[in-house]
Image (spheres, grey):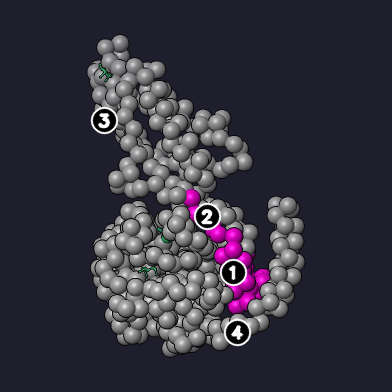
Amino acid sequence: MAYSFKCFHFFIIIFILHVFTTTQISSSTDDSSFNNFLDSAKSPEIFDWMINIRRKIHENPELGYEEFETSELIRSELDKMNIPYKHPVAITGVIGFIGTGFSPFVALRADMDALPMQEMVEWEHKSKVPGKMHSCGHDAHVAMLLAAAKILKEHEKDIQGTVVLVFQPAEEGGAGAKKILDAGALENVTAIFGLHIDPALPIGEVASRSGPIMAGSGFFEAKISGKGGHAAIPQQSIDPILAASNVIISLQQIVSREADPLDSQVVTIAKFEGGSAFNVIPDYVTIGGTFRAFSKQSFNQLRQRIEQVIIGQAAVQRCNATVDFLEEWEPFNPPTVNNGELHEHFVNVAVNMFGIDKVNSVMTPSMGAEDFSFYQEVIPGYFFFLGVKNASDKQAESFHSPYLKINEDGLPYGAALHASLAASYLLKHEHDVPGVEGKYHDEL
Ligand SMILES: *[C@@H]1O[C@H](CO)[C@@H](O)[C@H](O)[C@H]1NC(C)=O
Ligand SMILES: *[C@@H]1O[C@H](CO)[C@@H](O)[C@H](O)[C@H]1NC(C)=O
Ligand SMILES: *[C@@H]1O[C@H](CO)[C@@H](O)[C@H](O)[C@H]1NC(C)=O
Ligand SMILES: [Zn+2]
Ligand SMILES: [Zn+2]
């Protein structure tokens, strides 16, 4: 604790020096026209419109790759703003363009999908679809990106390049980000920013860090097969319940004994199915779970050892085991790793807009996963968290809670920051890649 506290102070000093020197150097680029983005986002014209969109999407949540009406709503708003877009990309995805149509290209991403759970919050705009809810705040992400688009469109003549708006399907499983990339939609994009609401962070505050911020994540399922029989005559059976129990114990020893204690990793068994009577040993047991790590190397090591331990430990009890990493259903999410230069850019822009005490630039990483990481594997990317905490709620509900509530007063901060991150990035990189022309210039 003490260490990071000191570190943070040290960082502030470095940062002040940095701001001082960069303002000296970059006085030729004038981004003063982007300074009032927060006021614009808070203006009733944009705020009310944005909140209305968020509530509409909240009432009608759609699961991954089924975001048809959400996608339609996005396109109709883009049409009204006269913003050209590509659709469909990755089934329901929409890619919009603001600016010159020429390089440099910077992307802003919002995910669109909801979760298969029943909303438990009683309010005017509660989900109208039983068993589906925007409990990860992707409804707010879409609304904020549309508001950022509106602000940027109003300043289009000042944009030195092209802002690429990425409305992405299927973040919650399904690797929508990967599908967007596979469609070639982000060719020539040199930086991508993404944000996530944080229900535990006060409004007007943001948090992120340089380097790994969220873990890589994978799932697995194993079938441990023995031989069923009468529970009172165990010598005639091969008990898969005992074998599976030992497998689970052994799996816990991978992280505790084989991983570097300073390199955070998780192996959790979250599923155990088998047996249905008090007096019958079943034929087989199915177990499953998730594993997490902050580097590809640690992740691959975990994957390999999970398979070896399940098969080897099952064999000790005369059982056979098969392990399925379910990659067809859910490709492994790489770790979310923030680019160092974009971190500097983010801190610069956010501190300018919100003040230094509202920007936590050394947040603690999370073992959660984000498919934003797929973009970061091929494009320098930056992911950050935006406060949407209601100050009167003592204990904030977490992501994926059926009780999740969002303080909508936090949304203008996200919209303005999105817009400013992109516009000022383009100003900075105006002369980076002369001559790269976007296809969209001709197509749209
Ligand atoms: C395990 O697999 C081997 C080879 O296929 C088979 O002979 C054996 O009966 C299996 N054992 C169990 C408990 O399923
Ligand atoms: C904050 O929570 C209180 C109590 O639940 C509620 O009355 C109020 O409307 C909430 N404010 C916002 C901005 O969501
Ligand atoms: C990327 O740039 C190349 C070279 O200018 C161009 O041929 C290509 O169409 C561009 N791709 C997109 C998606 O803009
Ligand atoms: Zn989520
Ligand atoms: Zn999410």
What's under tag 2, amino acid-wise? Val
In the picture, the disc for residue 345 is: 1
Q: Ligand 3 within 8 A of label 4's CB?
A: no
Of the two numbered discs 4 and 1 on the same chain, state the one appearing first in sequence: 4
Whole-percent x, y for residue 298 in the image: 51, 40
The residue to which callout 3 is attached is 276
The residue to which callout 4 is attached is 30
Distance (Cα) linking label 4 and label 2: 30 Å
Which span is picked out in magenta? 335-360
What's under tag 3, amino acid-wise? Ser
Q: Is residue 50 above or below residue 170?
A: below
- The residue drawn where x is 56% and y is 43% is 264
- The residue drawn where x is 32% and y is 26% is 321
The residue to which callout 2 is attached is 337
Which mark is in front, 3 or 1? 1
Q: Ligand 3 within 8 A of label 1's CB?
A: no
Mark 2, other Cα within 10 Å: few <14 / some 14–19 / many ≥20: many
